[in-house]
Image (cartoon, rainbow, N blue to C red):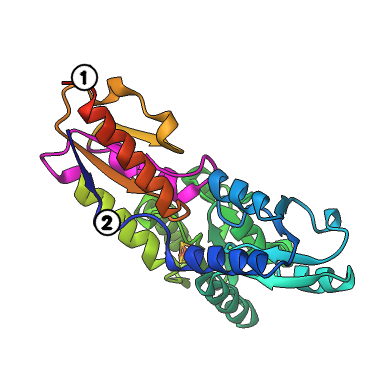
């Protein structure tokens, strides 16, 4: 059995930088807490814990020191709140996320109603919406949700996507809004890293030599789940957090296994999974 990695997979630039910033901070002897997972990967969270930078869910849980804002970003008001609590800030928000904050502010100032296609409970989306007047925006991700809104009420609408979504999955939702409110425009907010990993996952799935695909990533990683959904359209695909989740029976009769990983999956986890697959291939039972 051979293993073939996707052309593009794993850590994106935003997560790589966030990971480096926090590790440098810990190496220099600083201690602090991360608001939400620095990236959606349990292995990275455990690693940060070992480095003395623990994960918290609320700013109020941090008694003193430094609060780390994750790559997903936070509502702008959280910066003031942290300062008022006497906390220093290590901001690892991805620049692409900041671009969306900026573009949304401009659209809002120009009188547009904002639509965020995404998961309302995802920290990135909360970052965009938490500080806004609820009358000025909607968050949705299904056609049924879109159909419940009277879009005709809004003279101008600007649509944003959560960066890690698969835009084509939401075409019907956005087209519906456009059909009701002709002055609707779309912001191009799907991150290139996500697109590249998704395109490479499609290519992996179409590869006729590949019999099964392993997708590596955290349980709560939205972009990993989307990669898995793409791969499933083509081949039997298995979502794993690490080598320990692999099941030998998944690869019965498979000559070549495709491998890809979400944008929050560290390189060493990908290497471990690949090594485990190759060990499986060499095992006497398989031979
Ligand atoms: S997936 Fe894109 S938007 Fe999200 S952290 Fe990575 S580079 Fe930034």
Magenta span: 205-234
Mark 2 or mark 1: name the one nearer the start of the chain. 2
Which residue is identified by label 1? Answer: 284
Task: Using the rendered image of the protein, determine whether residue 74 is visible from the camera's viewpoint.
Answer: no
Left or right, 117 with reference to 70: left
Q: Residue furthest top?
A: 285
Identity of the residue drawn at 43% across and 30% down: 245
Q: Total marks drawn?
A: 2
Left or right, 130 with reference to 228: right
The quarter of the picture where residue 133 lies is: bottom right
Q: Residues within 10 Å of mark 2 (few under 14, many from 20)?
A: some
Task: Using the rendered image of the protein, determine whether residue 161 is visible from the camera's viewpoint.
Answer: yes
State whether residue 102 is above or below residue 10: below
State whether residue 51 is above or below residue 189: above
Closest to the camera, between mark 2 and mark 1, is: 1
The x and y percentages for residue 41 are 53, 47
Identity of the residue drawn at 47% across and 46% down: 143
- In depth, the one of 286 and 100 nearer the eye is 286
| Quarter occupied by the C terminus | top left
Question: Distance of mark 2 from mark 1, alpha carbons?
Answer: 36 Å
| Quarter occupied by the N terminus | top left
Q: Secondary structure at mark 1?
A: loop
Which residue is identified by label 2? Answer: 199
Numbered badge on residue 221: none
Q: Secondary structure at mark 2?
A: helix
Q: Residue furthest left?
A: 208
Left or right, 30 with reference to 42: right
- In depth, the one of 163 and 155 nearer the eye is 163
The quarter of the picture where residue 235 lies is: top left
Is residue 261 part of the magenta span, yes or no? no
């Amino acid at each position: 059995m051979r293993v073939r990695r996707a052309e593009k997979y794993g850590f994106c630039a935003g997560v790589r930088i966030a990971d480096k910033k926090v590790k440098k901070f810990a190496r220099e002897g600083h201690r602090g807490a991360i608001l939400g997972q620095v990236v959606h990967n349990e292995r990275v969270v455990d690693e940060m814990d070992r480095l003395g930078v623990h994960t918290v869910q609320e700013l109020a849980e941090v008694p003193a020191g430094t609060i780390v804002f994750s790559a997903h970003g936070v509502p702008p008001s959280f910066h003031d709140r942290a300062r008022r609590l006497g906390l220093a800030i290590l901001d690892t928000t991805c620049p692409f996320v900041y671009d969306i904050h900026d573009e949304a502010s401009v659209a809002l100032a120009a009188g547009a109603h904002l639509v965020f296609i995404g998961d309302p409970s995802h920290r990135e989306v909360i970052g965009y919406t938490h500080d806004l007047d609820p009358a000025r925006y909607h968050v949705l991700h299904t056609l049924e949700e879109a159909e419940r809104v009277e879009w005709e009420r809004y003279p101008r609408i600007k649509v944003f996507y959560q960066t890690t979504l698969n835009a084509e999955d939401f075409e019907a939702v956005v087209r519906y809004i456009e059909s009701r409110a002709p002055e609707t425009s779309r912001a191009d907010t799907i991150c290139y890293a996500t697109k590249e990993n998704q395109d490479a996952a499609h290519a992996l799935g179409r590869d006729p030599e590949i019999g099964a695909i392993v997708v590596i990533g955290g349980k709560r990683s939205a972009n990993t789940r989307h990669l898995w959904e793409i791969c499933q359209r083509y081949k039997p695909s298995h979502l794993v957090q690490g080598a320990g989740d692999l099941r030998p029976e998944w690869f019965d009769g498979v000559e070549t296994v495709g491998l890809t990983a979400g944008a929050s999956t560290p390189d060493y986890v990908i290497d471990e999974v690949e090594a485990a697959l190759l060990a499986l291939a060499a095992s006497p039972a398989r031979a």
